[in-house]
Image (cartoon, rainbow, N blue to C red):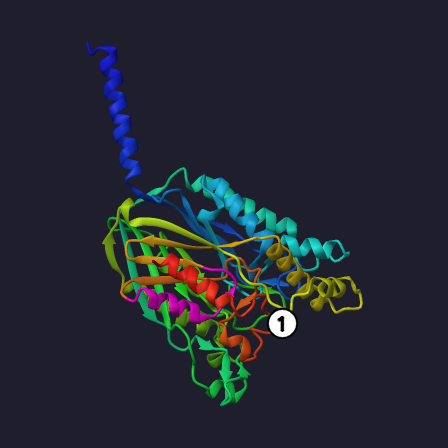
Amino acid sequence: MIAPVRIFVVTYALALMTHTAIADEVRIATFKVDATPAIGTPVAYAPVREILDPLSARGLVLLGADNPVVLCAVDWIGIANDGYDAWRTKLAEAAGTTPDHVAVHTLHQHDGARCDFDTERLLAERGLGGRHFDNGFLHKTIDAAAAAIREALKHPTTVTHIGVGKARVEKVASNRRILGDDGKVQIVRWSKTTDPAAIAAPEGTIDPYLRLISFWNDQTPIASLTYYTTHPQSYYGDGDVTSEFIGLGRAAREQSLPDVAHIHFNGASGNVTAGKYNDGSHEMRPILASRIERGMQQAWEATAKHPITVADVEWRVESVKLPAAAHLDEAKLTALLDDDKTPAATRLNAASHLAWLKRNRSGMKIDTSCLRIGNVYVVHMPGELFVEYQLAAQAMRPDDTVCMAAYGDYGPGYIGTEIAYGQGGYETSERASRVAPQVEGVLTKALQTLLR
């Protein structure tokens, strides 16, 4: 008969070995929930009249860094201010981590929902509530994502390898700012373009590559994370809800690899659209989707796998105070918002400006972050960032894989480069951007720290 003390010692030793083994493993848990608004409720530019295909919020929880890390991609146009805080707080609670370990990004589909509780509060105080935001639906989606994380964490999967691949995507992305001989914006190449001059102009500055990171348990793929940089619109604005050509390409990959979680992130696309290759006709949406699907497939087929351990995993955070644009005047914005003769779109814009200005003046900072896995770096950034930031980040580590997800906190609006604010164009106009030209210095310094 074994003595009770020996039984205790053996049992404790086995438990300790099991805990240590788990602690030394990289594990992930994936989740996906519906994020489709109801017929008649507001999306970006109109009430929903039809659901062409469903929207989702999807992502993963990575276990193996100092605290669990949550990466989440949502098929909405933007999540801003207190709405962004709510997403991060609820998902952090569900994952047993802190909000600074949560990165939430939208794919920026223009027939998706807006989420900004601060802006909605300002509108509701003036009798304009519910016209642009459906808070009940927004909170329901956040709660569903949190519940899905709790359920997924009951059965995390061990990760033994990470895969990296990339492929050039042909005839999708083009820079939307076409400069004249004077260095000023001569043509804005919108998401859909029929202007012969805009179509004939070169692609301009883009990142033509779709990058893919995959997680594997030995020979079994678990998740595929893809990153590509363009506004994802083919046509929009009538309330016909769709995940757009980027989501349709993702869905096609789900059909090809049904046992793999497919999570897509939009890169620094503030000044990149499909305009050179998209005339806005309905026929172009599936064509663009097929080009994205082909890029995803080729990046998957080009994947090279490498073993990883917890020693390879690191989460970095750099909080930044973005400089507010000089044109943001609280008194003037409040007057616009209070004037019931002001057009509805102008009042919405004034409320969005005011909500972010108040947060900025309160001392609020925005978290930028980076997930490092070996020599793979995934950077998470706010706003409608210009592609130059993404290319600069890649140049900081030319021998490594650098992916970027933008469209985090949507509050700052467009974030241009310093020179862009003197070039004109929509993206750096007072309507579109809430930050000052000095933002480039702030974010470049943050990128250097994250990618050190």
| Residue at which label 1 appears | 430
Q: Residue at x 77, y 62 (%)?
A: 338
State which region is magenta. Answer: 381-398
Please give the name of the residue rendered at 54% of the width and 78% of the height, measured from the top-left corner.
422
Residue drawn at point x = 34 percent, y = 58 percent: 452
Residue 237 visible in image: yes
User: Residue 449 appears at what percent x and percent y?
Assistant: 38, 58
Q: Position of residue 9 (x, y in %)?
A: 24, 19
Residue 64 point in image, percent of width and height: 34, 43
Q: As rendered, which of 301 and 101 lies closer to the eye?
A: 101
Give residue 350's quadrant in the image.
bottom right
Q: What amino acid is labelled 1 in the image?
A: Glu
Asked if the magenta segment contains residue 25, the reply would be no
The x and y percentages for residue 343 are 74, 69
Vertical placement of residue 158 versus 416, above or below: above
Q: Which residue is more in the foreground, 403 or 57?
A: 403
Residue 100 vertical position relative to residue 415 in the rendered view, above or below: above
